[in-house]
Amino acid sequence: MKKLKMLSIMLFIIALLSACVPSKDEPSTSKESGNTGAGGPIPVTIFTPKLSWDGEFRADVNEFTKHVEEKFNIKITWEFAPQDVAKEKQQLSLASGDYPDAYFAVTWLDGFSKIDVQKYGKEGVFLPLNDLIDEYAPNIKKAMGEIEYLEDGITAPDGNIYALASINECYHCSRYGKMWMDTEWLEKLGLKMPTTTEEFKNVLRAFKNDDPNGNGAKDEIPLSGETSEIGNSPTIFLMNAFIHNNGKDFINVENGKLDLAAMKPEWKEGLKYIRSLYEEGLIDTGTFTQNMEALKQMGTREGDSILGASAATHLAVFMDLAHEKSGAFDVVPPLKGPNGVQLTTANYGAVDTLTFAITEKAKGEKAEALIKLADYLYSEEGTMFAARGKEGVNWRKGESGDIDLTGKQAKYAMIPADPKEEEKEEAEKRYYAWGERGPNMLTRELRDSIAAPEDEFSPEGYERRLFNATLKYDGFEPEDIFIAKGAWIDPAEAEEVSLLQININKYINENTVQFITGAKDIEKEWESYLNGFEKLNVNRYLEIYQNTYNQ
């Protein structure tokens, strides 16, 4: 009897163990597959920043989350990081090994550099996506064939794709070195929009001396800006009448060879011109020390307006769009310099930051589900839903009379937000999108196809106003633009070139301000300034980037 009882127990244990082993037709419950059980949703964790304007992402209140969870049989657990510490938290998770199944980064906040991508790819933290893309991602493959810079931009030198990019071809953002001027002041003083550096100087003189605001006081500030955001510095717009200045790495391309704009004689001439404006009191003394908030207070001042012109990527940088003076400002097209140079800078058509990666924590069905999700976000339907919201709630198909930014029949039109939604209690609110994070396909074609009111001076017509303003900068870009941030640097040289760039950029920016403000004499100290680059090992810096450019 004892033997029979022992045999029965052993048979029961064997049967129990056998039941735990999945058959070929039964999904695995192992960590590698990611399934919760037979037919159950696959649990995935996604790390992303929580931006100040984000809504809730839970499936019970966010319709896009609910949509993709049902579509791909997944259950998302979000790991959020506050906006102000998002990059720090992201890097900490990677360093500690306590990372999620996937990262959905925001390009301008915690996007991955190409150096990061290679590092985590070679360490095995980020999965190579090539095979997953080939098998499960037709939209990604289609995009790689149609967007000329995409495949090279996401493929590391070892041939692997470790991360995907967010394609966000923001046309007005791409020409970030703009100058805005008060056209009412021009009209009052009988002046035309300046086209040359000399005309520009004369307009600023008139703004300073001829009382365009009509209050009888010499309180006008002809020109201002700020330098915390690159596109708001007047040195970019003004220097481009002498030599191409991208304001970021100062590297130019001439006949296939990289050089540093800030070391050229044309840069010196540009500095002398900008110095002459500052010396005459035509550039606000606070331009190189104030922040964006201070600039906006100047532009949105109550009472008599005092600001004649400002450098800014877009108007709202220095002026409240509801302010009575906002309609008076228009862009100054690129100026022609004394030697006929007339350029603008652009950052269009390159991948410099990546925003989606699958980690080695996600294997098997988890990885498959995540690449399918990314592939959906690379479709027009997925992009519109994720970035712009739900059809019928946030946007609709274009109808007769809907005109897009290019003047054609619009493909889509946004639906104005219902003010009553904001009045609802938090528990009653619904959310419909994820915003511009992770992978998406906001191509220029798609962005331009959305209807915009024809009245560009209405609050709703701001996008059209920016579009029309940016058209005035088209065609003035250099034939070949090198974007250092978009280069695939050998990881062995990454730390070296990063340190070199920090030191060189700091040196250029500091000396630029000192030459403009007169803290340094351009004629007497120019040679000393050039010699300083030798100590910063500028030849090695250019050599590293030249090698990447030649690849």
Image (cartoon, rainbow, N blue to C red):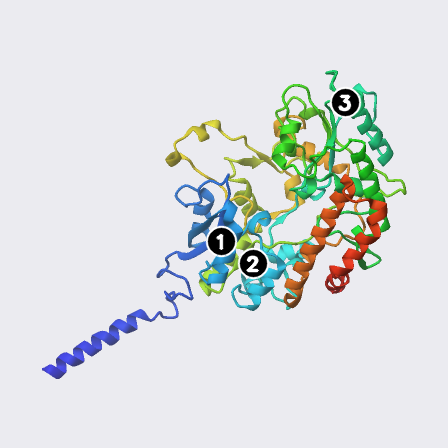
Give how far across and how far down residue 456 sits, in percent.
68, 28
Q: Residue furthest bottom?
A: 3
Q: Answer few, some or many: residues within 10 Å of disc 2's Cα (few below 14, many 20 plus, some between 14 and 19).
A: many
Residue on which disc 3 sits: 185
Give how far across and how far down residue 291 sits, in percent.
63, 37
- Given this view, does label 2 or label 3 mark the residue nearer the observer? 3
**How far is the residue under mark 1 from the one under mark 3?**
48 Å
Q: Is residue 8 left or right of residue 336?
A: left
Q: Amino acid at mark 2?
A: Ala
Q: Is residue 373 visible?
A: no
Quick one: label 1 or label 3, which is nearer the N terminus? Answer: 1
Q: Amino acid at mark 3?
A: Trp
Name the element at disc 1. helix
Q: Is residue 428 left or right of residue 338?
A: left
Q: Is residue 11 visible?
A: yes
Q: Which mark is residue 89?
A: 1
Give how far across and how far down residue 512 sits, in percent.
76, 45
Q: Is residue 390 left or right of residue 263?
A: left
